[in-house]
Image (cartoon, coloured by chain):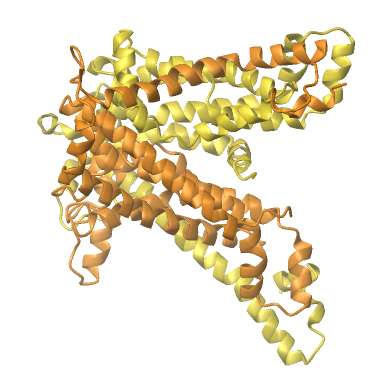
Chain colours: A orange, B yellow
Amino acid sequence: MNSVTVTSPPGNAPTRHRMTRNEWRNLRNGLLFISPWIIGFLAFLVYPIYYTVRISFTKYTGFGPATWIGLDNYHRMINDPIFWKALWNTVYYTALAVPIGVVVAMGLALCMNQRLPEVPLYRAILFIPSIIPGFALSLIFLILMDPTQGIFNRIITSVGLPGINWFGDPAWVKATFVFMAQFGAGQVALIFLASLKAIPASLHEAAMMDGASAMNRFWNITVPLMTPVILYDLILGLSLGLQIFTQAYIITQGGPIDSSRFYVLYLYDNAFKYGQMGYASALSVVLFVITFVLAALIFWSSNRWVNYDTM
Amino acid sequence: MATITRDQATGAGITDLERPGRATQRRLRRLLGQQVVPRIILIVMCAVFILPFYWMVALALKSNHELSIYPPTLWPHSLEWFNFKKATEVFPFWRFLWNTTAITALTIIGSVISNPIIAYGFSRIEWPGRDKVFLVVLASVFVPFPVLIVALFDIFARLHWVNTYLPLVVPRFFGTAFWIFLMRQFFMQIPRDISDAARIDGANEFQIFWRIILPQSLPALGVISIFAGIAAWNDFLGPLIYLQDASKYTLSIGLTFFQSQDSYDVKFNLLMAASALVVLPVVVLFLLFQRAFVEGISVGSFK
C-alpha cells in the first residue's frame, strides 16, 4: 500500500513525488506518536546543551545575573593544573578499564559458551554485580579494600606480603578503580555471549575439518564476527568511562592529593560546591567534545577492523 | 566418559580415525579445553564476584567488638542479626525507602506509558524520514548525562523544581532512548498484516496500538518496567543534584550522606547491613525475572 517514496527523505529526491493522502496521514500519525520524544528531546537534551554552551561564556554563580566574559573560562581551563590532572586521571582510567573490560568479558563469554550444564548459575553470579546500585557497590568496596578491615589485605598479609592502601595510596588508587570496574563485566559478557551464540556452528565445523586449531578459529572466525558488538561496547564503554563519578565521590572524594580527581567530580565540585556554574559549563562543553571526538575516532577506525558482513 | 561421547555427537570427532593413541590425546585436549579449563576460570571468577557480597554480609553480622579485631575475622563469630534492625534506626531508613519507592514507581509508570507510544511511531507506521530520526534517538544514548547537569539544575531551579521529585520523574514521561529502542525491536517482530487487517476494518492508528499491538507486548512492558525501576532505584547523581532536604533523600544519597558524616558515628557493620537491605530487592528481582534480564540485555547485542 505504500509507494516507493517512503524511505527517501522529503526534499531530497530530484523529482518530487507528490504524497498521497495515505502518506500524509502516516506522516501525521507517526509524528503524533513520537511527539513525546520530540518534546523530551528538545526540552531535556537540545535546550540544556544550548544552555550549557551559553553559560560557558559567562561568569555565573547560580544566583543573580550571569556576566558575559567571552572565552575566559576556556582560557582559565588551559591554565588550570587541576583540570589537566582530572582529565589525565579520567583518560588513564578509561584507557585501562575499557579494553581490560572487553578482554575480561570476552573471556567470560567464551567460557560460558561451552556446553556446561551449570552455565545459568555462573551467568547469574557474574551478572548480579552489574545490576546492583553503584553507590552500594562503592560502599562495599570502601570496606572490602580497607587497609585494616578489608579482605584483600587480610589475604595478602596472611601470606606475608605488605598490605596495600588501595584507595589511600596515589600509586594504587586508579588501578583499584580499574579493578573495581571489572565487576561490571558480567553485563557485557552476556551481550558477547548472545552474539557468540549467533555464530553459525557450521563455520567452526568447516574450519575444523580443514584442521584449523582452536586459536586459529578464534582469531579468524569468532573475533571478526564479534567486531560489531565489540565496537558498540567500546563506544558505550568510552562514554561511560569518561563519566566515572559515583565511585570516586563516595570512596575517595578525589583524593589522595587529587590522584582520583576524575573529570566529572571536578565538574560537579565547580558547579555545586564552588558556585562556578560558568566554569563548570565550560568543563561540560569540553567533556562533550572530548567524548564525541574519541567516539568518532573509534568509529572512523572501525572501517579497518569491523566486519560488517552478515553472518 | 559421558561428556566425551557428547562431544563426539557434535560432529567434532569425525577426524579421529587415525592412530588410537592420537585420538585419545585429542579427546583429552578437547576435554581440557571445553570442559575443565572454562569451568576452572568460571568458578574462580564467580568466587571473586561473590567476594564483595560475602564481605558485606559477613561485616553486617559482626558485633562492634568483633569489628575492632585486627586482622579481621574471615567469618562473623557472633551473627548479630539485630544489626539489620539497628541499621534501619541509625539512618532514617524507612523514610528513604519510601522516597525511593515513590520515585521508582513514578519512573516505571512514566516509562511504561511513554516508551511504547513513541516506539510505535518508530516501528508500525511508515513515514518519510522515520529511520533517520530514529538514528538521532540512538545517537542520544551516547550523550554523557553529566555534561547536562549544570544546565538541567539551573533550568529546573528556575522552574522551582529543585528539591522536588519532578526533575527525576517528569523526563521519564517523555521516553528514554534505550527503552524506545527495546520496545521498537519488539514491535517490529509483530507481523504487519495484523495492522493492515485492522486498518481495512476501519480502526484508526491509536485503536490499533491500544487494542491490538499493546496487548501483545506485555512481556516487553515487563522488561521495561524492571529495567526502568532498577535504574531509578540505583540512581545516584540525579538525587544528589536535585534533592536538598534530608527528609526527601533517596536511599542512594541518604546512606552515603550518613556514611560521610563522622559525627553520626555509623559503624561499618551497620553501613553494610543497610547496604545489604538496599541490594537485596535488586538481587531478588533479578533471580525472579532472570529470563527478562537476559533478553533485555541481549537486545543490546544487535548491530
Closer-to-camera residue (A72/A141): A72
Indicate the position of residue B188 as horizontal and vertical percent values: 74, 30
- Side (left or right) of B185 relative to A50: right
Q: Is residue B49 left or right of residue A107?
A: left
Query: Residue A131, how many percent across, how many down?
Result: 46, 39
Which residue is located at x 65 percent, y 15 percent?
A31
Whether residue A126 appears in this view of the structure is: no
Residue under the image location 13 percent in, 29 percent down: B264
Q: Residue at x 66, y 71 (%)?
A: A217
Left or right: residue B24 compared with residue A230: right
Q: Is residue B130 above or below residue A96?
A: above
What residue lies at 60% left-to-right and 33% top-to-bottom? B135
Quadrant in which the C terminus of chain B is drawn = top right
Q: Is residue B192 visible?
A: yes
Reply above or below: A31 against B279: above
Q: Nearer the viewer, residue B171 or A146?
A: B171
In the picture, the quarter occupied by the N terminus of chain B is bottom right
- Residue A38 at what x, y percent from top left? 55, 18
Q: Nearer the viewer, residue B145 or A169?
A: B145
Left or right position of A52 against B133: left
Q: Quadrant of residue B37?
A: bottom right
Residue B3's x, y, as percent? Answer: 70, 69
Vertical arrangement, residue B85 with respect to residue B197, above or below: below
Count of marks placed on residues: 0
Q: Point out the residue furthest to the left here.
A: B263
Of all residues, the one furthest to the front in this rendering is A14
